[in-house]
Image (spheres, rainbow, N blue to C red):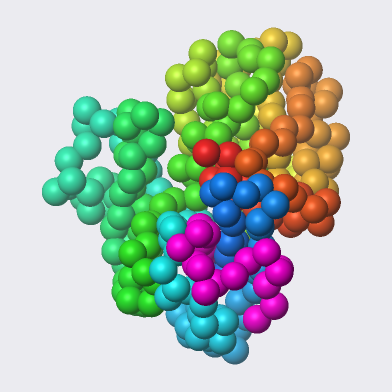
Amino acid sequence: MFLPENIDLANSENYNLSIRLAPNGFSFCINSPTDPSVFYFQEASIGTKLSYLESIKKFVFDLGIFNNNFNKSKVYVVSKNYTLVPDQFFDLDLTKELFNFNFHSPDGVILNEKSLNNEFHIVYNLDEEVHSFILRHLSYPTLHHHSTSLIHSFEKVERNRAPKECFIDFHDEYMTVVCFSDNRLLTANTFAETNTFNISYFVMGIWSKLGFDQNIDKLFLSGKIELQHKVEGELKNMIKNIESIELAPKTTFTEEQKQNVPTDLIATLCE
């Protein structure tokens, strides 16, 4: 496998590995926690000839690098099936019941992680065989949901704040929506949608339900540029304040990488 000259996996403990499991693809990046110039990103789509698990196995075995002893190995699960539970109502023994309440007959392992200074727990699922394979073939990985890094980064990003703010990131075939009121998380959801008319309908529905002011409050867009432009065109006559937002990772990106690296992965490089 081709890697930049400044990445030497003989010293893999100097680098962080981040793997991203999306419904239609597998991607990963390698970066240095101390040198912003060290960064590599690669992605591959998942076709129909192999199952999802077999596609991941082929990718992992063909590259043959993921069992190296990295400084940190993180796996991000991209999915629309997750629920946020306030810390005061969270019970580890009831995670499956909590998840089943929102998603009937879910498959796989039920996972959870803390978000926003431990205020919330994000409960999500992952195919059991994929989960087992990842744990066996990576060196001490930690698992995360893609929304975790987005929520954290959107809450922290430098901006001219409004009383209420709605962030939308376009990625894969999804849109992830995160809303705040005076830095308090109101909602976080992911929808499987790419049609700009439907997206606009969703956004206006969210703004109505959460009491957003179309003249004062703000809509921030990130992710796929083409969708950003189309959605802004649809909504600019209904929402006064619409801005594109870029995160500021501690890593040097090329222009191509800025376009192709998913926002949730970029968010992990801002920490």
Q: Using the image, determine if residue 53 lies above or below residue 252.
A: below
Q: Identify which residue is drawn at 55% across, 34% down.
A: 153
Nearer to the camera, 226 or 155: 155
Magenta-drawn stretch contains 10: yes
Q: Using the image, determine if residue 99 lies above or below residue 10.
A: above
Q: Residue furthest bottom?
A: 49
Looking at the picture, how far across and down is residue 137, in whole percent? 38, 77
**Is residue 8 shown to the viewer in this render?**
yes
Magenta-drawn stretch contains 158: no
Nearer to the camera, 204 or 269: 269
Numbered-mark total: 0
Nearer to the camera, 85 or 192: 85
**Is residue 264 shown to the viewer in this render?**
no
Looking at the picture, how far across and down is residue 225, in whole percent? 80, 46
Q: Residue furthest left?
A: 93
Looking at the picture, how far across and down is residue 256, in whole percent? 81, 56
Q: Identify which residue is drawn at 54% across, 49% down.
A: 33
The image quarter containing residue 246 is top right
Q: Identify which residue is drawn at 37% across, 69% down.
A: 139
Looking at the picture, how far across and down is residue 62, in whole percent? 56, 86
**Viewport quadrant of the N terminus:** bottom right
Q: Identify which residue is drawn at 51% across, 13% down.
A: 182
Specify start and end residues of the magenta stretch as a single range.
1-21
Q: Is residue 68 left or right of residue 132?
A: right
